[in-house]
Amino acid sequence: MDGGHGQRQPLSPAISASAVVPHQRQMQLHQHPARPAIADLFTLYLGVNSKQRAEDPAKETSNKLQKRVSALNRDLPPRDEQFISDFEQLRTRFPDQEQLQAVTESVLISFVLQCSSHAPQSEFLLFATQCLCARGHLRWDSLIPSLLSAVSSAEAPTGQGGSVTVGGPVSSSSAIVAPSAPSFHASNPTSPLSAMNAIGSPTQSGIDQPVGANVSPMKAAEFATLGQLGTTARGDQSCRGAEASYLYHLSCRIILAGLQSNLKPATHAVTFQHMINWLVNWDQRPRGVDEADPAQTRIERPVHEWMHLCLDVIWILVDEEKCRVPFYELVRSNLQFLENIPDDDALICIIMEIHRRRDMVCMHMQMLDQHLHCPTFGTHRFLSQSYPSIAGESVANLRYSPITYPSVLGEPLHGELPDRTIELLKLTNSETQCWQDWLLFADIFFFLMKSGCIDFLDFVDKLASRVTNGDQQILRSNHVTWLLAQIIRIEIVMNTLSSDPRKVETTRKIISFHKEDKSLDPNNISPQSILLDFISSSQTLRIWSFNTSIREHLNNDQLQKGKQIDEWWKQTTKASGERMIDFMNLDERSMGMFWVLSFTMAQPACDAVMNWFTSAGGAEFIQGPNMQPNERMTLMRETYPLSMALLSGLSINLCLKLAFQLEETIFLGQAVPSIAMVETYVRLLLITPHSLFRPHFTTLTQRSPSILSKSGVSLLLLEILNYRLLPLYRYHGKSKALMYDVTKIISMIKGKRGEHRLFRLAENLCMNLILSLRDFFLVKKELKGPTEFTETLNRITIISLAITIKTRGIAEVEHMIYLQPLLEQIMATSQHTWSEKTLRYFPPLIRDFLMGRMDKRGQTIQSWQQAETTVINQCNQLLSPSAEPNYVMTYLNHSFAQHRHYLCAGAWMLMNGHPEINSTNLARVLREFSPEEVTANIYTMVDVLLHHIQLELQRGHLAQDLLAKAITNLAFFIWTHELLPLDILLLALIDRDDDPYALRLVISLLLERPELQHRIKAFCGSRSPEHWLKDQPPKRAELQKALGNHLSWKDRYPPFFDDIAARLLPVIPLIIYRLIENDATDIADRVLAFYSTFLAFHPLRFTFVRDILAYFYGHLPSKLIVRILNVLGVSTKTPFSDSFAQYLGSSNSSICPPPEYFANLLLGLVNNVIPPLSSKSKSNPADASGNTARTSFSKPHASAQAGGNSNADGQRAFYQNQDPGSYTQLVLETAAIEILSLSVPASQIVSSLVQLIAHVQATLIQSNSGQGMSGGLGQNSGLPTSSSGGGAESAAANRANTSASGISANFVSRSGYSCQQLSVLMIQACGFLLAQLPPEFHMQLYSEAARIIKDCRWLADSSRPVKELDSAVGYALLDPTWASQDNTSTAIGNIVALLHSFFSNLPQEWLESSHTVIKHLRPVNSVAMLRIVFRILGPLLPRLAFARPLFMKTLALLFNVLGDVFGKNSQSSPHVEASEISDIIDFLHHAVMYEGQGGPVQSTSKPKVEILTLCGKVVDMLRPDVQHLLSHLKTDPNSSIYAATHPKLVQHPS
């Protein structure tokens, strides 16, 4: 049921290793003295001449027996009735009855193998077996497994007698002659065909192999194989098939006789498995036989009678009255997948019954949404289970969920690139401005082709076929030629066009796409039109260069047209110098011609760009303040960076060349590059995010292993990453890998003296990276050893994890497992404790871990007090105005490390008593400290100064005076002498927010001191948040002015983008968090108001807004929410709803918006986020019978977008959507922000959304028609036979009508879908949106969903027959995609579909609350409600298979709900037979197997012991008849086939 099934193979019963008898034991039995006597006795009664058994050694027997044998030496054997008395007389001679039983069993089986084809002899063997077992001389539980094992060995090919492979050759073209004696036929309890509904054949992986019971000792070699039964059979394969049929026939009759006794579960298991194997392999051909036409033998083969006996055995085993084997074992068997089904009613009947039961189980596992139409376990709804590692990045080639796929195409790539090309052609022909769409598509198309993800020949073939066989007029422009020209220099493509056997055919198809614009308007020439006009010529020239032999197939006009490009290039270079172009003064035509040049002659174009950056003349020599007089540094002069408009049209091949050349100059060149060159390099990466992206650390070190040791290279690289490329790395999911690379730098230099600039830049980049990660991450690639983070980064990591877990949940089971050791690893090297106010907002998983940590601040103060005298003495010598400069080195070389950590604290204390201290010496010492020591000084100084304020308050000083003095002293450190980094000081202060004065100091520094305000103003005035749009020559800031004395003192490498103010970008949001935690929302409002312009430079400000609204949901005043939203500004073009502003921060903000508002919100998601419905069967249209109800929908391409979002908005370039990364994500996150910003309670919001979804189809039909409900609605049965369903929806019909009236008449038309299509997608959108919101919304969803389900009147109507209610539930739970097509969707179906869409997008952690909806529905008092409960939770099982505690809770909940209806003390009425819920019984078995496998059920799947233990406990509360059907879900080997065959539960003999 869970995976693909391939060609059937012979299957073998899994026999435990302990069941194999040692060879020595086998020899003892073979040489046992009773064996010849027993064999002679059987020979006598079988009428077999003893001379024919010469292989048995003649042994001396008793005189009396010898006389009897001699006396009876006649043609006819004695009467069968005498056999038992003769046997009992014989057995008295042998005292060891256990060994005698084993020998008798061995001899009997050997005769079964030899005599099965002889009717009278087989009748005697059946008689003897029954008699011996009835008298206790043989045990059925030993005999049957031994017999089956022997049959498996016997039917193996010659030379493989010891094999246990079942399914040997059973092919015979002649009918099998039945024995003369009547055969045993049990009544065939097949279900009537009339009771079966639709038959489906979802894929299945295989069948289980139960471990067989212990078999009696025997030697397999003593049994003749079927090939040794006679010389005639040895050469006649058909005879071998006949012999096998006889053997099967007799074996089945023996088993049927044994089934009349009470056999052990292990015997039932091995018997069932062999019966299935025999049937599955019934038509397997003998090995080594050549058959002319296997298809012909399929029809001619007769149905063997032994197959009917096998079916008899199977039906008896699965008979629910005895329940020897659960019917589920048939459901997951291979029997339903027979490729060659004989024309036999009995076999077809059982296969159909299996399919019927299987499909019913599948329905419990199926998501009610438009993505899963086929009931199958094979397709997981949530694909992240397959991610191989939690520490690394997501594998690049893994499929994303269709809704969250981050590509520019908005949906997964499954070979639909020709479809996308055709779609863009249609948009182009409709005169829609879609040049940006083509650019985005070309980028990812180039990337996929270069990565080998696309077959070039296949793509060209399919595209040519679409153009040729489709609309001939679709190809009206040269866009396809331009697209192919982008990839024509890729090695795979070049090899294909130059050496592939189909190169000429492929070239012809490529040329067939040429469509020049003959009506080019000379007065309205754009760069795009120039490019498209010349691109055919460029491509033709390129193809010719690959293979000159195909010249005859090329267009000579195009070859001649290429000369125009050469002429233009010669004229341009002649006018402006060799290979020189004035890129700032290009007109439209020149820009277009340069684009053409990039396709035709990439290297000259690349040279022209590189020459541009040296066009300002020679290089200038700079001498910094910290450089020696004879030191000089070469610096490129500034020029204009190339504009995005120019770069966007260049060929991707040129972009690659240019990026490579720029990297060579920027990172490996001798001169310091210009800012314009670096900006151009960055713009290239942003404009083609897929084709050009490569991890920088890996790429650069491969080119030059020692590159990062070069002066200035590390600084420049970290600046580019920190201030330009952070969103790009996050877009590609490479933030973690980058974090590990930067951490290596930090760990290497954090203890190195004087490396402050590089360290602080790397630390700031790591802060931004950690805060940008919104999924689980490890601080090291392994959970071993202490973290390499600094104290600051450890604290940032805890905050980031708290925000992620609270706002997005923990996505994977593995993440939840590793969270505890991760926290232990982080806190092992951190001394920090968070305040109660901060902890109360932390998610419980982190809060509970941190609550018990001891606050070591007291120890810090105590250590300070012990060292204070020494430290103050050292500071007096070092920091007095008259201190000797030479004492600096003495202090550095001879002071203790613990005393150095208190240097700033000592200086602070001195400043309180001395008006001046020696700032020069202090600056020198702090510079010579390692970065780690400076950080320790800052944290210690903050603790000391806060403690000092408290002491001074106790001495009667005023708090205002003390704070003013403290601010002055801090200004001395930060601004006056620039001794300490401001960002670390602010972080240290806000981490002591439990001190009443820490945050007051922060606010004074941020809002009251002019120094920082001037810095921020200068920073904002000299830069632009959208740096890619700034085309003026950049101005480089002086190093000391940009970074201050402490960071710049020994460095001379000039800065590019770095600034002290920029270091505050990750800090300001954390300050806002801390202020809100301390209920200082008014101050937070002031800080945001002042720094709103500055926060526009935050690379991830959109994420900041979304996360802070979710983190503090329910605790933010409306005024602050508006202020937070203002951080987004206007430049991001955030796609808020048109009416959003009127419900935000106004007088009526407490009023819930009308249904139309939420409908428009969902419509925006349908149009921009949810994958469109598209036809998957274009070549197979619906047949003429009108079977169109299940065909897929197709959305019109030229539809208008909702909310004013045009197609151009939807395809904005990455650099315009860097945060959150794509327009799809932007629309989704914006919708979440809107919901989180509303002042109304979550309960009202969820109620509005759920009510809209419950009646979505009726609402849309009414709004679209402007009339009442359609004619098919409102039937009198009271059952859910329509979208309003009379009684089905009566509890909420009025609400539905009211909501419909609030939706505009053109609502449906704005989507481009029909009412039916749109209703399905809106359910998807609503579930997806709710899954993005915090758990407060989830609880309300569960409550509202349960209320709507229970409000359905027909569910509570106990007077209706059970069958009628079951039918109603099945109808109500139709897939909404199907139901909507007939206008028959129901509230229950829509709500269950909503829950499924919601569940499928939830992270693993948040799934733990999914039981809440079931708890609201309990107590369940009807089978109808029971089915709804199972329908809700069933599809969750694949998600929960890896989360055992949650799986066990879910399984226990399902059993408890079952107990509500079928419990021993259940009060539900009317009484329902257990057989009515056979599908639920089967489903529970499958759930147990699914968890045991940890995924789709395989042939080796075994239930876990813990699950069987749980089931055994909960089953006891059920009615006896239901317990009986679940009796195998226990740990008792005497009643459960699963326990009896479980290796951990079976006690094997030693």
Image (cartoon, rainbow, N blue to C red):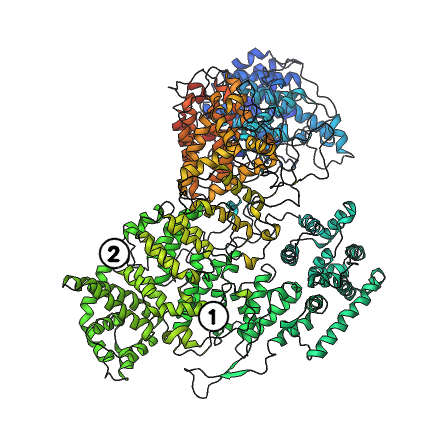
Q: How many marks?
A: 2
Residue shown at the point (34%, 64%) measured from the top left: 1006
* Vertical side of 1249 occupied by 839: above or below: below
Furthest toward the left, the residue is: 955
- The image shows residue 1303 at horizontal and vertical percentages of 54, 36
Q: Are marks 1 and 2 in contact (CB under 8 Å)?
A: no
Could you tell me the amino acid type at mark 1? Ser
Residue 804 visible in this rendered orientation of the protein: yes
In the picture, the disc for residue 1022 is 1
Q: Nearer the viewer, residue 100 or 953?
A: 953
Q: Quadrant of the N terminus?
A: top right
What residue sits right under mark 2 in the picture? 855
- The image shows residue 387 at horizontal and vertical percentages of 51, 49
Residue shown at the point (76%, 45%) measured from the top left: 470
Binning the other alpha carbons within 10 Å of mark 1 as few (below 14), some (14 to 19) or many (20 upward) gives few
- The image shows residue 639 at horizontal and vertical percentages of 57, 75
Q: Quadrant of residue 119?
A: top right
Residue 1550 visible in this rendered orientation of the protein: no
**For marks 1 and 2 on the same chain, the one whose residue lies earlier in the sequence:** 2
The residue mark sitting in front, 1 or 2, is 1
- The image shows residue 312 at horizontal and vertical percentages of 59, 19
Left or right for 229, reference 100: right
Residue shown at the point (48%, 74%) measured from the top left: 709
Furthest toward the bottom, the residue is: 630
Could you tell me the amino acid type at mark 2? Asp
User: Label 1, label 2: how many angstroms apart (C-alpha)?
Assistant: 44 Å
In the picture, the disc for residue 1498 is none
Left or right for 337, reference 1296: right
Furthest toward the front, the residue is: 1147
